[in-house]
Image (tube, helix red, strand yellow):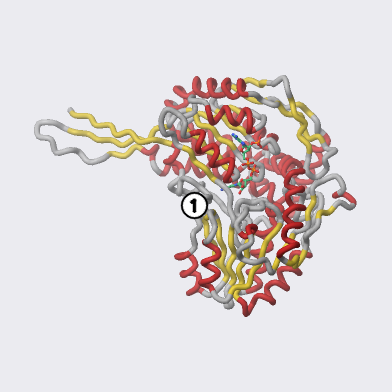
Amino acid sequence: MPAQKAKSFKLTYATMFDPPAEMHTRYEAAVGKTKAELGLEVSMIIGGKEVKSTDKFEHRSPINRDWVLAVFQKGTAEHARQALAAARKAFPAWSHTPWRERVRLLRKAADLMDKRIYEFGAVMSLEVGKNRSEALGDCAESADLIRYACDQMVANKGYVVRMGKDPLKGYTASNVSVLRPYGVWVVISPFNFPCALTTGPAGAALVAGNTIVMKPATNTPWTVRLIAECFRDAGLPDGVFNYVTGPGSTIGQELIENAEVDGITFTGSFDVGMGIFRTFANGRYVRPAILELGGKNPAIVSRHADLDRAVRGIVRSAFGLQGQKCSAASRVFVEKPVYNKLVERLVAETEKLGIGDPTRKEVFLGPVINQSSYQDYKSFCEELSQSGRFLTGGKVLAQGEMAKGFFCQPTLVGDLPLNHRLWKHEMFLPITTVASVSNLDEAMREANDVNYGLTAGFYGSDDETEWFFDKIEAGVSYANRPQGATTGAWPGFQPFGGWKGSGSSGKNAGGVYYLPIYMHEQIRTLIR
Ligand code: NDP
């Protein structure tokens, strides 16, 4: 089928819940093909060469631990150094490649991702446990993130701006502001959006003229290998995008300690991110560190809310990708007059969600990512059972096709005292706590009383939405949105980033202010 067919409709997080039949048949064919070819060994790519390590690791699926998806390289600190050297070597030529040419190559890479979108989707379902819409949505967004960075470069004409001419008698002055790349940029991504959280930072860093060393999460190296292939096949010169795999504690640690690094984008948990920030600060001078960290995202429901919208939006955001989104709706504050009605409907909708192998069409929730998350789910449920009340869920599932994976019931908890620690701790699982509040001011106080400030949702009247946008401490806020109370981002539509402990740059990826943070400014004053 021609590649353009894949784009005959626009897949976004808002539209993906009602896709055409063609999406299903092509995705299912890709899953079949991918499953028939499991178990191959996959190399790193350093300086354009396929590189193997002495040690390997088996990459197993969270859907069924018997499925060895592929065998990946356990890269070492030495591989990190080789990749940084390759990126350093490639930097002079890449940074001096005319920006229009960089844009051309990167747009080609985005088109290659589109062509392979169903393969990407199948791989992501198998390695992350995403359902088909989530998996394909991540890939489509990823290609658009690259394009958006290119569009911004074009719209800003390469960020070359003529400034004022100093009025110097007897001379002619010219002042030009130029944004220039930093050099070698490290990108470290988390498991939950292996595609978008690689191409978002990498697309911006590359179009700006930096070269990259990319380390994916150990749970999701495969998707990122496909991205590396798209950059390579688009014609990016050797060493411009280097792909290394292995544990964060070894190869990742070297990447953040090495003085060869000029900038870093880390997306992941607060604790690891803060550790990276502190380590990175030990360099010879201050270098840019873009940190995109966790969330503890509130949804507030007013007594004037359209409850149909609220229920749809909250369930989708609480349990999409098994609650393992940085933007998951993990806290719900409901005004007392509508609390019982809302809870009753949330429970009913949650209990309708299909759970199982996420490559099946009717399944909404796949497994959680690994043994450690599975164990966390059990521990949190035990803790919650002592202080709160399960409105629904609370158990792991192991019957039938779920026997060998990490499946957990979507869980809503009520009656949890508002001073309980789990109101503030990011569980990153399909667990959402729900509280009744006496008024919206109380809801807002609770909503903001966390270290995080990533996303937030609101359901209420038009007047109240203005109040919500003004008061809420979050980088991404949504009102009256049935497509997702707290989730959903798209370059050029909903740029994504966090305040407070959720992000360091104060600028959202996929937005108009993002690309410049990958460049430093140089003023060029010339007197004739
Ligand atoms: P982690 O923080 O556990 O890991 C993220 C990445 O950091 C992985 O690639 C990991 O490698 C690597 N890493 C771990 N230790 C080190 C180290 N010492 N040096 C360098 N790299 C290291 O996060 P998860 O993968 O579990 O992702 C979930 C978290 O990410 C949640 O907190 C979520 O909220 C956040 N997130 C934030 C987003 C945002 O935009 N703000 C978006 C998506 C997720 P390895 O896997 O090998 O350990």
- Residue under label 1, please give it: 500
Residue beneath the point at 72% across and 55% down = 380
Is 405 displayed left or right of 278 in the figure? right
Is 372 displayed left or right of 523 in the figure? right
Is 354 displayed left or right of 478 in the figure? right
Ligand 1 positioned in quadrant:
top right
Residue 95 screen position, x and y as percent: 44, 27
Q: Secondary structure at mark 1?
A: strand
Front position in the image: 382 or 39:
382
The residue furthest bottom is 337
Residue 239 screen position, x and y as percent: 55, 23
Residue beneath the point at 58% across and 30% down = 253
The residue furthest right is 400
Residue 270 screen position, x and y as percent: 57, 46
Task: Answer yes or no: disc 1 within 8 Å of ligand 1.
Answer: no
Is 50 placed above or below 400 here?
A: above
Front position in the image: 158 or 2:
158
Quarter of the image with the N terminus in it = top right
Tally the numbered discs. Answer: 1
- In this view of the protein, can residue 167 be seen by the observer? yes
Image quadrant assignment for residue 341:
bottom right
Front position in the image: 91 or 23:
91
> Are there few (<14), some (14-19), or many (20+) residues within 10 Å of tag 1?
some
Residue beneath the point at 66% across and 29% down = 245
Residue 491 screen position, x and y as percent: 53, 49
Is 211 placed above or below 148 here?
A: above
- In this view of the protein, can residue 101 be seen by the observer? no
Front position in the image: 396 or 510:
396
Quarter of the image with the C terminus in it = top left
* Amino acid type for the residue under numbered disc 1: Lys
